Image: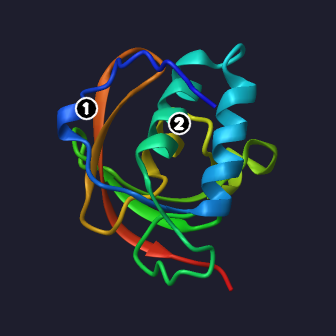
């Protein structure tokens, strides 16, 4: 599956990311199926899954953001610290702090490790940076 991704994000400053093979497959399919409705964030998510280092599904990824992870991160512009659970779109519920991977910040978080920072574009086309402070996995 070949994609031509419009690079509206700075490729030079991208931190390395790690995603399990099964999550990468599911996220890639989600990005592909969402291109018509959410082109910018779908392209961003597709780019992230394409550039990720893939690991076995049973890999021990203690400090890596995965689907279902509880993530504490800092907005580097405001200094605000937020804690969210990264979920698929049908599980999203902002009142429960369940953020979809098909949002700009959700797509930015996937695969990052504690201490890493990434830039992403907000829906209003502003560039923001977040730094991962902690990752917890359910189960």
Q: Residues within 10 Å of mark 2 (few under 14, many from 20)?
A: many
Q: Residues within 10 Å of mark 1 (few under 14, many from 20)?
A: few
59 sits to left or right of 57: left
Residue 25, percent from left and from top: 67, 50
Quadrant housing residue 120: top left
129 sits to left or right of 46: left
Q: Residue at the spot x=63%, y=74% of the render? A: 57
Q: Which mark is residue 11?
A: 1
Dot 1 lies on which element? helix
Q: Residue at the spot x=30%, y=55% of the render? A: 16
Q: Are marks 2 and 1 in contact (CB under 8 Å)?
A: no
Q: Is residue 35 visible?
A: yes
Q: Residue furthest left?
A: 12
Q: Considering only vertical position in the picture, is 131 above or below 129?
A: below
Q: CA distance from mark 2 to mark 1?
A: 14 Å
Q: Residue at the spot x=64%, y=58% of the render? A: 23
Quadrant of the drawing holding the N terminus: top right
Q: Considering only vertical position in the picture, is 61 above or below 5?
A: below
Quadrant housing residue 126: top left
Q: Is residue 97 visible?
A: no
> Which is more N-terminal, label 1 or label 2?
1
13 sits to left or right of 139: left
Comparing 58 with 106, the one in front is 58
Residue 98, percent from left and from top: 66, 54
Q: Residue at the spot x=50%, y=18% of the render? A: 4
Comparing 72 with 39, the one in front is 39
Quadrant housing residue 37: top right
Residue under circle 2?
45
């Amino acid at each position: 599956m070949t994609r031509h991704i419009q690079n509206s994000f700075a490729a030079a400053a991208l931190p390395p990311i790690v995603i399990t093979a099964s999550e990468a497959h599911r996220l890639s399919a989600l990005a592909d199926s969402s291109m018509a409705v959410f082109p910018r964030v779908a392209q961003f998510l597709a780019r992230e899954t394409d550039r990720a280092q893939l690991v076995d599904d049973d890999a021990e990824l203690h400090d890596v953001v995965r689907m279902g992870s509880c993530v504490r991160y800092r907005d580097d512009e405001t200094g605000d610290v937020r804690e969210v659970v990264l979920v698929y779109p049908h599980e999203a519920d902002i009142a429960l702090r369940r953020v979809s991977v098909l949002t700009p910040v959700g797509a930015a978080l996937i695969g990052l490790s504690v201490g890493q920072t990434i830039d992403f574009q907000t829906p209003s086309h502003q560039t923001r940076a977040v730094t991962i402070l902690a990752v917890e996995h359910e189960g």
